[in-house]
Image (cartoon, grey):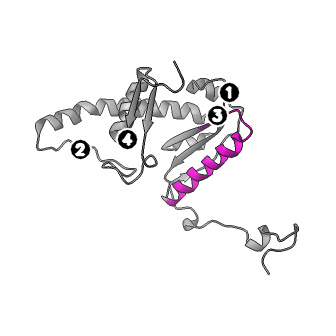
Amino acid sequence: MDADSYDLIVIGGGLIGLSTAYNASKRKLHTLVIERYSYFNNSGSSAGATRQYRVQYSQQYLTELALAAESYWNQFQLHSYETLIRLVARVGPYAAQAAFAIVVTTEESEFAVSDGSRAIQSMILAAWAEGVGSNWVGFRSMDEVKVLLDIPSAMDVLAIVPFGYPAQAVGRGKKRRKSLAEVAHSERFGQSFVK
């Protein structure tokens, strides 16, 4: 199949769109999701990171659908965490309690590591702004991860980035950083940028 052709194109990466894409991929359909905003944004009808599972509806058929869907949610959760646990075994047990992890892959190019690193930095900073903790773990040459996730041999796994809410507040939202005078130099290394 041509790399630019798809069996299914899903417009909208919200709850319904991602669910559709997930089930299509399980059926081995080459699927593309197009989302106007970033994923898990606050602009859709099912915004936010948390969910309430409800079965109280005024229409009986909605209650029946919700009850029928519960087993699928349970299967999805078990499947997701099984892969996550096997994945983080490569990088350390502390990551096994993450809500999810993103495996960052790159294609061979002069700027692959730079581009992938910038993407990771953006994800970590965006997560931190929402109170979600994350960490860069692993660095390249993770062939067992490629095998686990069926990643093509021509691609490289740059890193794994687990995400989750910290069990306790860390640093009260502030980082312990060196002063600007210690890290910024003017004209020559060692000449303080700050006067």
**Is 58 displayed left or right of 33 in the figure?**
left
Q: What residue type is labelled 1?
A: Asp
Q: Which amino acid does label 3 sit on?
A: Arg
Location of residue 72 by image quarter? top left
Mark 4 residue element: loop
Mark 3 residue element: loop
**Which residue was labeled with disc 1?**
143
N-terminal of the two: label 4 or label 3?
A: 4
Q: Residues within 10 Å of mark 4 (few under 14, many from 20)?
A: some
Report how far apart the C-alphas of labels 4 and 3 lie in the structure: 33 Å
N-terminal of the two: label 1 or label 2?
A: 2
Q: Is residue 119 magenta?
A: yes
N-terminal of the two: label 3 or label 1?
A: 3
Q: Residues within 10 Å of mark 2 (few under 14, many from 20)?
A: few
| Nearer to us: label 1 or label 2 | 1
Mark 2 residue element: loop
| Nearer to us: label 4 or label 3 | 4
Q: Give the range drawn in magenta.
A: 104-129
